[in-house]
Image (cartoon, rainbow, N blue to C red):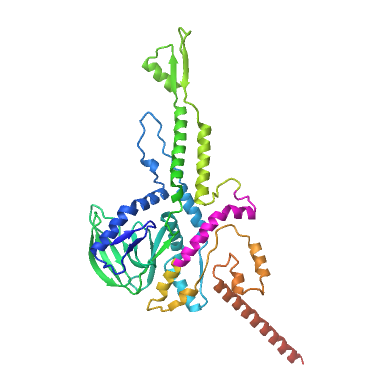
Amino acid sequence: MIKLNNKKLFTADKEAVINTDFINKAIELHRGKLLSLYIENENMYMTNHDILRKEKKPNYKPDNRIILNYAKYIIDTFTGFHLGIPVKITHNNEVISDVIKEFRKINDMLDSEFELSKMTNIFGHSFIYLFQDEDAVTRMTYNSPINMIMIHDNSISELPLCAIRYSLGDNDGDSFGEVITNDEIISISVDANGKVKILERVNHQFHKLPVVELVANEERQSLFDSVKTLINALNKAVSEKANDVDYFADAYLKVIGAKLEEDIALHIRDSRLINLYGETNNLDAEFLNKPNADATQENLIHLLIKSIFDISMVANLSQENFGNASGTALAFKLQPMSNLANILDRKVTSAFNRMYELLFNLPTINFGDEWKVIHYKFTRNVPRNIKEEAEVLALLDGKVSNATRLSILSIIDDVNEELKRMEYDDNKASSFTRNLLRERVTDDVLDE
């Protein structure tokens, strides 16, 4: 009935009946095939890596568990680069623009968009969920694929069929969730074994599935999926290096040619002083050291760190002399990350189009297809040269529209709002000039 393909995509027949068997099968596939992968990614971001769960070494051996959380570094660096400066959303119609602004303000979209992008980079995809609260205000929230499933039909278009939002049950009782379809919201309960019971069905106002999937890529891969093994190997290498430091700090003392009583041995250990006397022809005392592999370890650590950034295509901003590079050199260093950001721009634009399509087609708003002419502007969060931007702005005077020229300036968040301010300033200046001329004319007449 329900299938899961290699793109982490659930599919079912578009005529499928949404009943308990259907929901149970979806949750069973989600728990059995995907949930452990998502939890692994969440653990890596939250600094709960595999090395913490390795078998403990004997008590007499050093057992450091050090985590260099490059998974979190990669996600936070890229998300800040991509959406550290909020996306600018504009519409030519002032009324529609005001509705967009109000929707974004009510739903704290500046924060929500950033968290949504971060979640997408961690798991490979995430979900936007629109709903109406008790006051009939349209709200937006985001969900991770840990607790939400979207099921598509098995047509060539793979259109969304329904979505299931649920949490894991525990021994204390059932957890609750809901199934969202094109027409209704079905409340469900889920027990600790994942078995579902339908509680209530309520119609919603969207007349279309109010859940939108945001994918990082078609394969729904996390930003650090390709470097998980490298990160785990780096944790192991650094931990073993720390173990070696502990080993050398607590090296065994070898004494040949003299018998040490237990109290003497303890005294030598605590005072770190050796004073053996008597027959010394065959006496030897020295610390036992294992071969030093420091150079090999350092080479491995440097190789792993370099490989992590090379393969993930996220720039290592903490690299020595990174900030001292010239403009062109810096652009080349950031090029791989810029390519990833450009891909995600298109995915975010597609998801936001679906979101605003849902919003605009609510009976209370009814803007129809106006979502098609919403303009999204993404700005990379890198140091900006305002002087250069102003020079480009001046060079384009008379060659492109004022709106296009102003969009170049990174210090302007809302181009339409800036155009209104400029128009207001022009009108105010014109009014002042007219009043001044009128006063001069009046004075001239009086003088005559």
Residue 66 x, y percent position in the rendering: 43, 40
Residue 377 x, y percent position in the rendering: 53, 67
Q: Nearer the viewer, residue 115 or 349?
A: 349
54 to the left or right of 238: left
Q: Nearer the viewer, residue 440 or 170?
A: 170
Vertical placement of residue 324 versus 26, above or below: above
Report if residue 83 is visible in the image.
no
Q: Residue furthest front?
A: 156
Vertical placement of residue 4 versus 439, above or below: above
Vertical placement of residue 50 versus 243, above or below: below
The residue that appears at 47% across and 14% down in the rendered structure is 284
Residue 436 x, y percent position in the rendering: 69, 83
The residue that appears at 25% across and 53% down in the rendered structure is 170
440 to the left or right of 246: right
Q: Main secondary structure of the magenta part?
A: helix
Q: Nearer the viewer, residue 129 or 223?
A: 223
* Number of residue marks: 0
Q: Quadrant of the C terminus?
A: bottom right
The residue that appears at 51% across and 78% down in the rendered structure is 93
Q: Quadrant of the N terminus?
A: bottom left
Report if residue 339 is visible in the image.
yes
Q: Residue furthest right?
A: 448
Determine if the magenta segment contains residue 178.
no
Residue 173 x, y percent position in the rendering: 22, 56
The residue that appears at 60% across and 70% down in the rendered structure is 406
Determine if the magenta segment contains residue 336.
yes
Q: Which residues lie in the magenta part?
A: 322-350
